[in-house]
Image (cartoon, grey):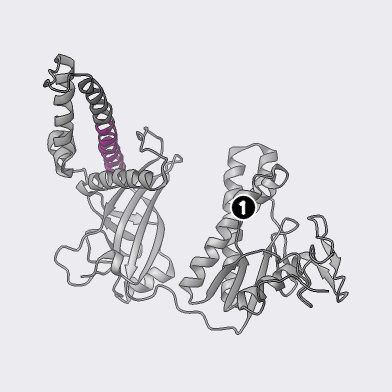
Amino acid sequence: MKRMSSLAYHFGIKLRFYPSSKQKKIIKLNYDAQRFVYNSYAGRNRTNYHARRFLAINQGQAMPFAFPILNDYEAKLAETVVANDELLAKPKNIRDAYSFLRVKEIDSLALANAIQNYRKAWNHYRKIGHGIPTFHKKRSDWSYQTNCQYPKQKEAYLDNGTAKFIDAKHIKLPKLGVIRIAGLRKLIKERLLKHVSTRIGTVTIKKTAGDQFYLSMQLGSDIAFAQKLPKTQSQIGIDLNLDNFLTDSNGAMVAKPRFYRNAKKKLAHAQRVLSRRQREDFLQVLSTALIKNHDLVVAEELRSKNLLKNHALSQAISDVGWRRFLNMLAYKAKLYDKEFQTIDPKYTTQRCHNCGTIMGQNGCRKLKLKDREWTCPMCQTYHIRDWNAAVNILEKGLGSWQNPKKQTA
């Protein structure tokens, strides 16, 4: 059987489920257990770090030809380091050391995932240089991870692992047993009914602060989860701007929603949550429409980090969610076998797409941000700034516009 990472296609689903009172207690028990294990690793490694540093400094002060003699405090520190190293050497050691981690309701894979997540956090820190793993605090929302295993099966399906679908309304999970779910997407229901080879990987069980329970599953398969969309023989360039959300190379504009700004005026947490959901829905619908209706979508590389340094524009940029939008276009293009690319935005707003004149060169006045409409001084073509930029973006993506060169008189 193939490993999850070697499967060609991956898909994630999130389901609402309704546990019984007993199942809620088991979820809380596993959440507390995995948090205890994670914090044990964080605390013991932190203790070892400081103890080794203390001993190294003190031993360095001893005579170079004399064997250092440890006092009682230093000896206890050395014993603590050895004990911690032994406990953390193997994942099963911490379960053997604490009897409450061995009760039958606790999922051993939840504990293993806690250790794995701690090690991933350290690898992430070593890679980027900040974000040292810290203690996990007790919270009103719970979550823990487990895994679906296929111990004797030759092929993985949605209904033959340790985590499996009983039917379209019920799932069986390790330690929790059978739970009722709100319902399946048509895409997943068809794979279940048609018995399509699909492997379940990581399973995350989560309770929100509002006492709602959700189940997230990572699925993998060598059979695509979505059908390829038909080719439309259409291409489009899109320009992200501050006057509206975007302008495309056909001249169409999408108005900019101001969810965050409106929510800020109300100063209510519930409204901020609602605004994020509205923005997410807006971005999902718009990105899907662009991918379905065009074979190629070209956009400019977003450099919002630099733009956010401008305090006059930062709120408007944060309001529209461009980074999330471009990420959606990228993964949906891959999912539906379409093409999405980003290009260097240099000169896209300053260039006349009709004759190639670049404003700001050869004595031409450079366009400012307030210049929303302009006329090319060379060919006298009238431009709407954002529409012209979208056309340039498409041409650059198609490779029909070479890198601009200085024009000669």
Q: Is residue 150 left or right of residue 39?
A: left
Is residue 336 highlighted in magenta? no
Q: Amino acid at mark 1?
A: Ser
User: How far from the left and from the top, in percent, is residue 291?
Assistant: 57, 73
Which residue is situated farthest in the top direction here?
A: 72
User: How far from the left and from the top, in percent, is residue 178?
Assistant: 27, 55
Q: Nearer the viewer, residue 242 or 289?
A: 242
Image quadrant occupied by the N terminus: bottom left
Q: Nearer the viewer, residue 173 or 284?
A: 284
Image quadrant occupied by the C terminus: bottom right
Q: What residue is pinned by disc 1?
A: 304
**Residue 7: quadrant of the picture:** bottom left
What are the residue bounds of the magenta stretch? 22-45
Rendered residue at 14%/31% (across/down): 82
User: How far from the left and from the top, in percent, is residue 408?
Assistant: 79, 74
Q: Is residue 164 left or right of residue 268?
A: left
